[in-house]
């Protein structure tokens, strides 16, 4: 059997669960740098949200990605090894899905803090919900 047929069969057999939904992410280091400098920071004990509104002046980005929201998940090397960083990113992706992200018209960076993997999921989710509800994203959540 040709290899291409095996790939097609494998892709067709993947189930469509809620975890297989792909999030549109901010990939450009220039866009991430711009969000770090001009974005609004929302802090929790476990992570920091950096939120920036998608601007109309960035027609190339809007034409390429649309006006639906994008997210980025950052766990720095200073905070832990690869296992720690991967666990933190998995948890941030799950938090983003549970909060209803990505939010239309906004780019949001999830920035991990040292205490993220050690805390229970319910504590992290509750702190993030409280922060999001008190921010301007509350209309979208």
Image (tube, rainbow, N blue to C red):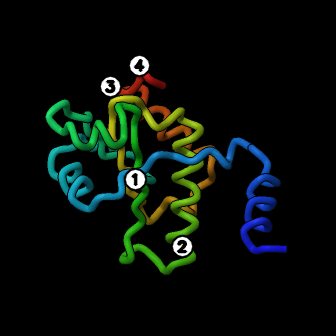
Residue at 74% in and 57% down: 11
Give the structural element (helix, strand or loop) at label 1. Answer: strand
The reply to whether the C-beta atoms of the residues labelled 4 and 3 are less than 8 Å apart is yes
Residue under label 3, please give it: 136
For marks 1 and 4, the one nearer the N-term is 1
Q: Which residue is mark 1?
A: 72
Question: Disc 4 and disc 3: Cα gap in Å?
Answer: 7 Å
Q: Secondary structure at mark 3?
A: helix
Query: Residue 79: horizontal and vertical position, in percent?
Result: 41, 73
Whether label 3 touches label 1, CB < 8 Å: no
Identify the residue under disc 2: 84
In percent of the image, x 57 and y 55: which residue is there?
A: 91
Q: Nearer the viewer, residue 62 or 109?
A: 62
Residue 2: x percent and y percent? 79, 74
Q: Nearer the viewer, residue 55 or 11?
A: 11
Instruction: Identify the residue at image location x=55%, y=69%.
Output: 86
Is tag 3's residue or tag 2's residue first in the polypeptide sequence? Answer: 2
* Place of residue 75 in the rendered image (x, y in percent of width and height, measured from the top left): 42, 65
The residue located at (51%, 46%) in the rendering is 23
Q: Answer with left or right where residue 30 lies relative to residue 43.
A: left
39 on left or right of 8 = left
Q: Which residue is labeled 4 in the image?
A: 139
Measured in 3D between alpha carbons, the distance from the residue under mark 3 to the one under mark 2, in whole angstroms, is 31 Å
Name the image quarter holding residue 10. Answer: bottom right
């Amino acid at each position: 059997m040709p290899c291409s047929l095996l790939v097609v069969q494998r892709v067709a057999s993947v189930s469509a669960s809620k975890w297989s939904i792909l999030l549109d992410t901010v990939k450009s280091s220039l866009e991430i740098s711009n969000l770090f400098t001009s974005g609004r920071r929302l802090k929790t004990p476990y992570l920091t949200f950096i939120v920036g509104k998608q601007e109309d002046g960035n027609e190339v980005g809007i034409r390429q990605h649309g006006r639906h929201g994008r997210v980025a998940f950052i766990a720095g090397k200073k905070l832990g090894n690869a296992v720690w960083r991967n666990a933190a990113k998995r948890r941030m992706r799950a938090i983003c899905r549970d909060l209803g992200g990505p939010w239309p018209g906004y780019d949001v960076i999830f920035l991990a803090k040292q205490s993220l993997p050690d805390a229970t999921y319910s504590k992290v989710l509750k702190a993030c919900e409280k922060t999001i509800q008190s921010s301007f994203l509350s209309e979208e959540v």
